[in-house]
């Protein structure tokens, strides 16, 4: 007597007798993968010190509800500047600098177009860079008329009622050694004197003296990726930076 095999069972036999995976198992597998990722994340963050973990979370600007956050950049750069989690900029301070940036972009539009002024933000604050040889004679810290014209615009920006930030003036040079017996004798003195002369000019044009500080770095802080090996790179490193610091009290 012949046995009748149902069509469904025939198909299963043709597939080697393996039953198909239930549909719910796909969803279950996805859920387990997500749980595994979640617990790995917990384990990873558990090995990070509390201060470092807070620093990571501070990069979020409040879009995730439980993370109020602030404005920050890489942890390494902040550490180099001596900043801690307590001194990270507040959102209110970030908004003020954002307004200052818009004003600066408007004020220095011709200079930016001519690539004689560069404006950017970094871990220090809003940075206005006076670039190339247009602002100082070679080996000299004296302010030439073209430099004074741009610095007058800087003074207008810094005397705005909305700008209450501390401001640091940083002088930089290339790596070409000075061979002089009188002042300035080396790149340290040259960079420092240039920043001091800028500070004095800003004070003479209405900027409050207690907002300003001066620093000279010589040849030792070239622009990122700049090797000081070509005339163009050396020209870029001969610069003065006016920095509106993130924190009003930061020096």
Image: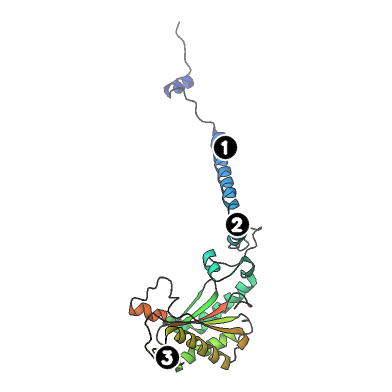
The residue where tag 3 is placed is: 140
Q: Quadrant of residue 136?
A: bottom left
Alpha carbons under labels 3 and 1: distance apart: 73 Å
Up-down: is 186 above or below 7? Answer: below
Q: Nearer the viewer, mark 1 or mark 2?
A: 2
Up-down: is 99 above or below 40? Answer: below
Alpha carbons under labels 1 and 2: distance apart: 34 Å
Mark 3 residue element: loop
Q: Quadrant of residue 251?
A: bottom right
* Rendering coords of residue 117 (x, y %): 46, 82
Mark 2 residue element: loop
Q: Which mark is residue 174?
A: none
Local crowd size for mark 2, using a 10 Å CA cut-off: few (<14), some (14–19), many (≥20): few
- The residue most toward the front is 181
**Residue sitting at 52 percent across and 68 percent down?**
77
Alpha carbons under labels 3 and 2: distance apart: 48 Å
**Of callouts 3 and 2, the N-terminal one:** 2
Q: Is residue 115 left or right of residue 94?
A: left
Up-down: is 87 above or below 151? Answer: above
Q: Which mark is residue 49?
A: 2
- The residue most toward the top is 1
Can you say which quadrant of the picture contains the N terminus? Answer: top left
Q: Is residue 104 left or right of residue 86?
A: left
Mark 1 residue element: helix
Q: Are marks 3 and 2 in contact (CB under 8 Å)?
A: no
**Of callouts 3 and 1, the N-terminal one:** 1
The residue where tag 1 is placed is: 28
């Amino acid at each position: 007597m012949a046995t009748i095999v149902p069509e469904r069972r025939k198909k299963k036999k043709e597939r080697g007798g393996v039953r198909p995976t239930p549909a719910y198992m796909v969803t279950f597998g996805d859920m387990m993968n997500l749980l595994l990722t979640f617990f790995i994340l917990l384990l990873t963050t558990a090995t990070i010190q509390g201060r470092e973990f807070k620093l990571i979370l501070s990069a979020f600007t409040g879009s995730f509800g439980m993370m109020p956050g602030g404005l920050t950049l890489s942890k390494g750069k902040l550490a180099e500047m001596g900043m801690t989690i307590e001194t990270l900029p507040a959102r209110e301070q970030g908004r003020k600098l954002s307004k200052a940036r818009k004003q600066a972009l408007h004020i220095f539009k011709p200079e930016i177009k001519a690539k004689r002024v560069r404006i950017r933000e970094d871990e220090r604050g809003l940075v206005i860079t006076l670039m190339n040889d247009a602002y100082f004679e070679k080996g000299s810290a004296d302010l030439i008329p073209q430099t004074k014209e741009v610095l007058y615009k800087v003074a207008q920006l810094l005397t705005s009622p909305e700008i209450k930030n501390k401001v640091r003036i940083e002088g930089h040079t290339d790596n070409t050694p000075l061979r002089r017996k009188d002042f300035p004798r080396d790149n340290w003195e040259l960079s420092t004197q240039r920043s001091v002369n800028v500070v004095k000019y800003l004070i003479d044009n209405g900027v409050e003296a207690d907002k300003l500080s001066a620093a000279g770095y010589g040849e030792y802080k070239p622009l990122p990726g700049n090797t000081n090996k070509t005339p163009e790179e050396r020209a870029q490193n001969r610069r003065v930076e006016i920095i509106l610091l993130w924190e009003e009290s930061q020096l």
